[in-house]
Image (cartoon, grey):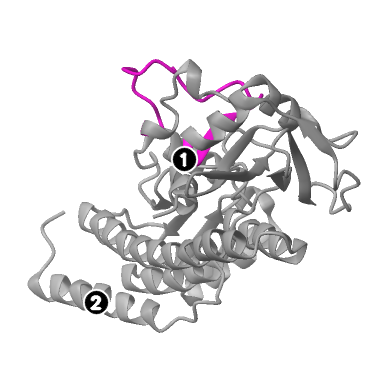
Amino acid sequence: MGSPSYKTLHRRAQFLYQLGRDLERISSQLDTSRVVRIALRKLGEALEADIAIQVDARYADQTLKSPYRLALTPRGTKLLERAARNPELEPAGPPFLEQCAEFLRRGIGPADRELLLVRIALGERVVAVLGFRRPGRNWGRADAFLGRDAAEIVIGYLMHRERERAQSVKERIYAKLLGELRPKDVLYQILHGLERLLQYDHSGSVHLVSPSGGALLLQAEIITWTKAKSDRIGRAYEIDDPAIDWLRRLGRPILLRGDATAVEGDTSASAPSEFGPWTRLGPSELPPESIVRALRDTMPGAPASGARILVPLTRESSVLGLLQIQGRSAAAFTRNDLEALTCS
C-alpha cells in the first residue's frame, strides 16, 4: 500500500484539529465513557469504518466491560444485525475482548488486519480500548497513526478534566478541611468528593488525633462495598509518639498494597519502582505498628483491601490526623491518584 495522498493527509489533519475543538465544547459534567464514545464515532467516520466498538475498563480493578457497538454505515448495520441473529458471527464478542486484553498486555496490534485497536489511557490507568472494523479491507500504517494521534487528543482533554477535578478536591481537603476541622459534614463532603474522583470501591475514612494526642478517633467513614452506615464512628485507637512522628515526617500521600505493612515493589532506596518516589519507602517510612492496628480494624465481613492510599493531615507543625482510601483490587489506584492528593 502506497503513502496517502496530500489530500488525504490534509483531510486527516483537519479532522484532528476539529476533534480537539469539538472536545473543548463538551460539557465538563459529561462522564468519561460518554466523552470517549463521542470520539469513537468521529474517529470511526474519519477512518471510514463500518463498525466502531468501545470497551471501557473498570476504574476499580481495570477489568474490561462489555463492548459497546456502533454501526457507522449501512453495511455495518447489516453486519451487527446478522451477528445478533448468529452469535458465532458476533464482531465484538468474547474473542474481541480477548484481543483487547492481549493488546493491552503486549502493546501491539491484533493479527486480524481488518481490526484496528486504539488505546485510551491516563498514565497507568486504561480508560478504554477502541476497535474499528471494515471487513474486506485491511488497515494500513497511516490508519494506525491517525488512531494514535486522535487518542492523544482525547487523552489530553481527559487529563485536563482530571486535573481540574483533582484541584477542586485538593482545595476542599487542604482549605475547607483544615480550616473548618471539626464539623463532620465537611469530612463526609470530602469523602464523597474523593469517591467521585477516585471511584474507590471499599471504604474511605478520616481519623483525627485526639486532644490528648494519645489516640486516633474515627470521625467519618463511608462504606462503599455495601453502602451500609458505619457503626464504628467515634471508636478510639491508641497511638504512640512514633506514630505522631511518622505522620509529621511523612508529609505526602503514599500507596500501600494489600496489608498495611506491605508496599508495592522493592523498598530499597536504589530499586526502581512502578510509582517512583511514592513507593520507594525505607523501613522507617512504613506505618508504625499502632497505626497499622487502627488501619486493620474493619467492619465484620468486609472484603480484603487490595490497595490503600494514606494521606497525613497536618497544619504547619501540628498533626491533625490521617485520611485513608481503600480499594478492593491491587490495581485500584495509580500514581495519578497520588498526585491528585498531593498538596501543592
Percent across and percent down for residue 296 are: 75, 28
**Closest to the observer, 261 or 305:** 261
Q: How many marks?
A: 2
Residue 143 to residue 325: above or below = below
Residue beneath label 2, please?
Answer: 17
The amino acid marked with disc number 1 is Gly
Percent across and percent down for residue 102 are: 47, 36
Separation of disc 1 and disc 2 at Cα?
A: 42 Å
Residue drawn where x is 61% and y is 61% of the image:
177
In this rendering, position of residue 120 left or right of residue 313 = left
Lower position in the chain sequence, tag 1 or tag 2? 2
Q: Is residue 146 visible to us here?
A: yes
Outermost residue toward the bottom in this view: 25
In this rendering, position of residue 299 left or right of residue 14 = right
| Numbered disc 2: secondary structure | helix
* Image quadrant in which you'd find residue 107: top left
Residue 185 to residue 88: above or below = below
* Image quadrant in which you'd find residue 257: top right
The amino acid marked with disc number 2 is Tyr
Residue drawn where x is 62% and y is 57% of the image:
194
**Closest to the observer, 105 or 188:** 188
Percent across and percent down for residue 114 are: 38, 52
Residue beneath label 1, please?
Answer: 251
Magenta span main SS: loop
What span is in magenta?
250-276
Looking at the figure, which quarter contains the C terminus?
A: bottom left
**Closest to the observer, 157 or 266:** 266
**Neighbourhood count class around disc 2 (C-alpha, 10 Å): few under 14, some 14–19, many 20 upward:** few
Disc 1 versus disc 2: nearer the observer: 1
Residue drawn where x is 85% and y is 46% of the image:
234
Looking at the figure, which quarter contains the N terminus?
A: bottom left
